[in-house]
Amino acid sequence: MELPALALLSILVLLCYVFEVSSARTRIPSVLLLLGLGMGLRPVCSALGWAAPELSRLLPEIGTVGLILIVLEGALELRFSRSRAPLILRSLGLAVLTLMAFSMGLAYVLTQAVGCDFRTGLLNALPLAVISSAVAVPTSRLLGPADAEFIIYESTFSDILGVLAFNFVLVHEVVGLAAVKSFLFQLLLSGLLAFGGTLLLAFLISRLKHRIKFGPILALVILLYSVAKYFHLPALLLILVLGLFLANFRKLGRFPRLAFLHPESLEPEVRRFDELLAELTFVVRITFFLLFGFLIDLKAFFRLDVLFWVAAGLLGVYVLRAAFLFILRLPLHPLIFFAPRGLITVLLLLQLPSALRLVQIDDVLVTQVVVLSAIVMMAGTAGVSRADNPDAGLAD
């Protein structure tokens, strides 16, 4: 049975790659196909008489690696410059407003509906408020350059800020002045550790001549994450700052003491590192969604009682999004449709201790949220072409 199993794994990877590449033309988000393929594998394995091993324990481990890769890859996308300042500020503003308004609104609804305290409601609501860059960015390629760049920044900010807010609320049972001071101190320590790690990474990237260099560098990144986690520092914040330093390292060339790192020559190497991250993130993402889909009961997925609440929640998402787009004087179409949920939503809920996880926010509800939000985005971009208005939208 080893050969058929290997053949099946190879076919799955190739199919997932086809989904990824063809999503821009078919307009079907790859997450829908990955989840569908994962759910379809379960009856296939049963029909073939293959006994699937216990896989649910793998999800948190894969999820941790996925979070590190997603935050690092997202940070490497954030290149700062004066010309991008208006775009960055507006995308950051929309990400912050929608994240805060929806998560706090849903947390209040949960306290009234299920009787939980506000912190528990907020911890369950925050993952559902995060826009998935892994789903939104590939579809944004259908838009004009300005709108597509806005989606990249907004969804990346939403990913990163959602993760940071979730970890902040999870670590601090009481959110007050002491918690804010503690967080700011941890922020300072993480920044210093990230800057030191960036200098070390930059030195290694510029000095290592061996053909194998990025594997050990990625291992060093994960080691820095583990050290920060051990000392109860915001580890993902460390990864974020490290990625921001690497992405904008060329700007440090103005400091003479850093000239020995040759910042101007690091950009091609950082680009290669970013390409490696994209490959690894693809592998982790398809593994995660195939496994998550495989663990979902296909019959339970179509529960109408859950679907009603999912639809009501998503309606709230798009109403809030429309309101904030109007306030920030941003175009309503097609940006209103780009609010998909995805990998970050599932990963954060998996990190939530069982004592804090509400039974109402189960895997079926989360899967329906991911699927329906992707369908809305797909429907909203129907008929939209990159060539329709290449320079319209957000360019100043």
Image (tube, helix red, strand yellow):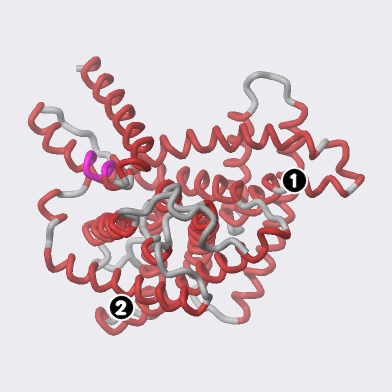
The residue shown at (50%, 52%) is 390
Which sits in the foreground, 243 or 222?
243
Name the residue that disc number 2 marks. Answer: 110
Q: Residue 36 colored magenta?
A: yes
The amino acid type of the residue labelled 2 equals: Leu
Toward the viewer: 378 or 343? 378
Q: Is residue 360 left or right of residue 190?
A: left
The span from disc 1 to disc 2 (Cα, nearest Å) is 44 Å
The magenta segment = 33-38
Q: Are marks 1 and 2 in contact (CB under 8 Å)?
A: no
Pick out the residue farthest to the left.
47
**Callout 2: SS:** helix
Label 2 CA crowd tier, 10 Å (few <14, some 14–19, many 20+): many
Q: Earlier in the sequence, mark 1 or mark 2?
A: 2
The C terminus, quarter of image:
bottom right
Callout 1: helix, strand or loop? helix
Q: Looking at the image, can residue 134 be seen?
A: no
Choose top left, top right, bottom left or bottom right for residue 179: bottom right
Residue 209: horizontal and vertical position, in percent?
A: 73, 21
